[in-house]
Image (cartoon, grey):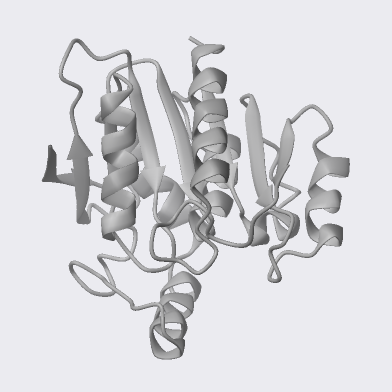
Amino acid sequence: MTDTIELMSAVDGFTLSALSAQPKAASKGGVVVIQEIFGLTEHIGEINEFFADAGYTAIAPGLFDRIERGFHAGHDPEGIQKGVGAVKASPWKQVISDVQAAIDALPRPVYVTGFCYGGAATWMAAAKCKGLNAASCFYGRLIADLLEAKPAIPTMLHYGARDASIPPENYEKVRLAAPDAPLYLYEAGHGFCRKGSSDFDAAARDLALARTIDWFARWP
């Protein structure tokens, strides 16, 4: 079951909303789930529930609440433009602080994962946040522009081989910069974990999430 909670960011004392999902039994630890540009969507809620079903407490912080409480953007061109605008209006220092607030609210050990924009935010959290054990980044196009930020924890990467928005030179640049980070390619396009996407691929999603669970279990 997913609930809405509130977190306080240390960077400015702002109170942001977050989705929280609890496991049915004693928690194995915590997972921060970082949103796409569309906000705290049904997809992000489902990912939270996935980790709760796997035994973790999961929290997805609403990173765009300063722009609009309960921020939501559609998947049409207008919605994408709205989401991109929200990204540009959210400096990394602020995002890192918001993610840190989620980390601090979770039982240990704590892990982080994210999708698209959230994949890049996961990379930044792996480099800048405290109290994390491992990270798993999903199709983060912006990671290739953030390579000066070096993850301080074990970090895994997932990309779609047919992703038109992330060409091979993008993720190969990441592979070269982070040779110790496992990087997996799937025969899928962008957003292959999100139901309703034209690129949704259940087999790729299930394999990538299974790898993520195994990866987190390696770093208690």
Q: Nearer the viewer, residue 46 or 31?
A: 46
Within the image, what quadrant is residue 35 found in?
bottom left
Q: Nearer the viewer, residue 150 or 109?
A: 109
Lateral position of residue 198 relative to residue 10, left or right:
right
Lateral position of residue 185 relative to residue 110, left or right:
right
Residue 1 visible at all: yes
Q: Position of residue 126 (x, y in %)?
A: 57, 36
Q: Across the whole image, how many numbered discs are drawn on residues?
A: 0
Residue 57 visible at all: no
Q: Position of residue 104 (x, y in %)?
A: 30, 29
Q: Position of residue 220 (x, y in %)?
A: 48, 9
Q: Residue at x 56, y 11 (%)?
A: 218
Within the image, what quadrant is residue 188 found in?
bottom right
Q: Nearer the viewer, residue 85 or 115?
A: 115
Q: Quadrant of the N terminus?
A: top left
Q: Residue at x 68, y 64 (%)?
A: 163
Q: Residue at x 43, y 56 (%)?
A: 194
List the single residue furthest toward the bottom: 78
Lateral position of residue 50 relative to residue 90, left or right:
left
Lateral position of residue 184 relative to residue 217, left or right:
right
Q: Position of residue 74 (x, y in %)?
A: 34, 78
Placement of 177 over or under 110, stated as above or below: below
Q: Nearer the viewer, residue 102 or 72?
A: 72
